[in-house]
Image: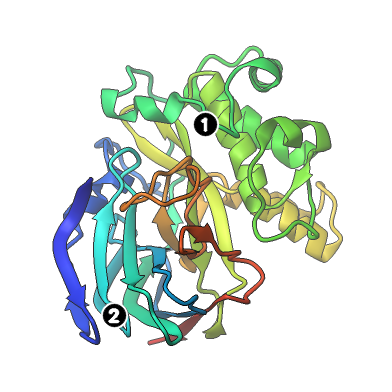
């Protein structure tokens, strides 16, 4: 198992980490080409969002049983700066780890047979910049070896069978990465619906989603990723949370997607947000605002979105007692090897807040 840094946090000790993990965040922005990312005619400068994000968590103990917690640990990348990290609580140990396969960074804390409520508070300052990428160049070229993992299937996102058959139909006549990605993006927006009754952000079971054609952000982003991979376009989900407003943002978890253009870099797409806007405002595809959103979310992402990581089917560090984790966006906890439900807010309770600076 690989540690992100050799950081051990003992009981009741508060730490501050300024930018120690910035080098590791090349995982999220690796292989960027030298091509310009902003149109030379683009007059609008990227917007910025600056503030403090705080996670407060508590876990109900069970007598004689160890308690373990894993949290996403956002790091700096090309579009966000993470600094002034603070950690406090009554844990026995806490460390920051890197999951070797996906490069995901996670905070791990443990309480050894606690007899009182296990608590932890984790905060950091974030400076986030809007992504504006409209000067697209449809480069061709070999996929770098280190990005070949973004062509592979996952347990809920196969790249064969119905997924590949659908993608081949949707991208018929398209021979370039940009052409295929655009066709898949448009097809999803034109055929999928947002289902507000799904718990959380959805699970991203792509084969089931192709039949139902409705879901939430993880679902819709996973369909894009699986279909893109099935026709040779590197793609990935980016899990995170929105910082649109000050106050409680616990319900603002979100998942978007990205695809990779050789010699250009990663391009953000968010068809789920287009469908969300349509649902919330009762709009159809020909609505001018929908057309604007549809154009914006192919190559752009707001400054209010905080990236956590990319990765599916995770074996956490240290390894969890349960099966590989579909994704680590919400807090994940075990008491005595038993997984706690991270949605019901009972034995595992947590809030996420944001304060603008």
Q: Percent x, y for residue 96?
A: 25, 62
Q: What residue is shown with label 2?
A: 87
User: Measured from the top left, where is residue 61 in percent x and y?
Assistant: 48, 78
* 1 or 2: tag closer to the N-terminus: 2
Quadrant holding the N terminus: top left
Which type of secondary structure does the marked residue at label 2 adopt? strand
Front position in the image: 69 or 302: 69
Which residue sits at x=28%, y=69%? 82
Q: Is residue 289 visible?
A: no
- In the picture provided, is 312 more to the left or to the right than 104? right
Name the quadrant containing residue 349: bottom right
Q: Picture quarter containing residue 45? A: bottom left
Q: Is residue 67 above or below residue 218?
A: below
Classify the position of the C terminus by image quarter.
bottom left
Residue highlighted by disc 1: 154
Q: Are marks 1 and 2 in contact (CB under 8 Å)?
A: no
Q: Looking at the image, which residue is at 26% across and 36% down?
A: 31
Q: Picture coordinates of residue 9 (x, y %)?
A: 20, 74
- In the image, is 354 to the left or to the right of 92? right
- Residue 118 at least partly seen: yes
Q: Position of residue 88 (x, y in %)?
A: 30, 84
Q: Which residue is depicted at the point 17% across and 69% down? A: 8
Comparing 55 with 289, the one in front is: 55
How many C-alpha atoms fall within 10 Å of the one at disc 1: few (<14), some, or many (≥20)?
Answer: some
């Amino acid at each position: 198992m690989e540690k992100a840094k050799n950081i051990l946090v003992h009981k009741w000790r508060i730490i501050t980490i300024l930018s120690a993990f910035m080098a590791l965040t090349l995982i999220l922005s690796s292989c960027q080409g030298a091509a310009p990312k902003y149109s030379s005619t683009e007059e609008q400068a990227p917007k910025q969002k600056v503030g403090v994000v705080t996670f407060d968590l508590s876990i109900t103990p069970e007598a004689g049983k160890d308690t373990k917690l894993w949290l996403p640990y956002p790091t700096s990348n090309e579009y966000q700066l993470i600094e002034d990290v603070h950690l406090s609580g009554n844990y026995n140990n806490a460390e920051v780890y890197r999951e070797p396969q996906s490069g995901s960074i996670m905070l791990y804390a443990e309480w050894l047979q606690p007899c009182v409520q296990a608590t932890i508070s984790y905060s950091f300052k974030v400076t986030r910049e809007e992504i504006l990428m409209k000067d697209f160049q449809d480069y061709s070229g070999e996929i770098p070896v280190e990005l070949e993992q973004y062509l592979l299937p996952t347990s809920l996102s196969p790249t064969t069978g119905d997924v590949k058959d659908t993608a081949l139909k949707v991208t018929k006549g398209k021979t370039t990465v940009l052409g295929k990605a655009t066709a898949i993006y448009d097809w999803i927006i034109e055929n999928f619906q947002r289902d507000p009754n799904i718990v959380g952000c959805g699970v991203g079971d792509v084969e089931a989603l192709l039949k139902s054609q409705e879901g939430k952000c993880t679902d819709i982003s996973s369909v894009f990723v699986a279909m893109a991979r099935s026709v040779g376009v590197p793609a990935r989900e980016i899990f995170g949370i929105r910082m649109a407003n000050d106050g409680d943002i616990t319900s603002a978890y979100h998942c978007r997607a990205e695809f990779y253009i050789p010699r250009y870099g990663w391009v953000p797409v968010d068809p789920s947000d287009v469908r969300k806007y349509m649902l919330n405002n009762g709009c159809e595809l020909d609505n001018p605002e929908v057309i604007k959103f549809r154009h914006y979310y192919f190559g752009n992402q707001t400054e209010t979105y905080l990236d956590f990581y990319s990765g599916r089917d995770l074996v956490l560090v240290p390894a969890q007692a349960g099966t590989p984790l579909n994704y680590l966006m919400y807090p994940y906890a075990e008491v005595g090897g038993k997984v706690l439900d991270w949605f019901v807010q009972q034995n595992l309770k947590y809030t996420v807040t944001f304060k603008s600076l």
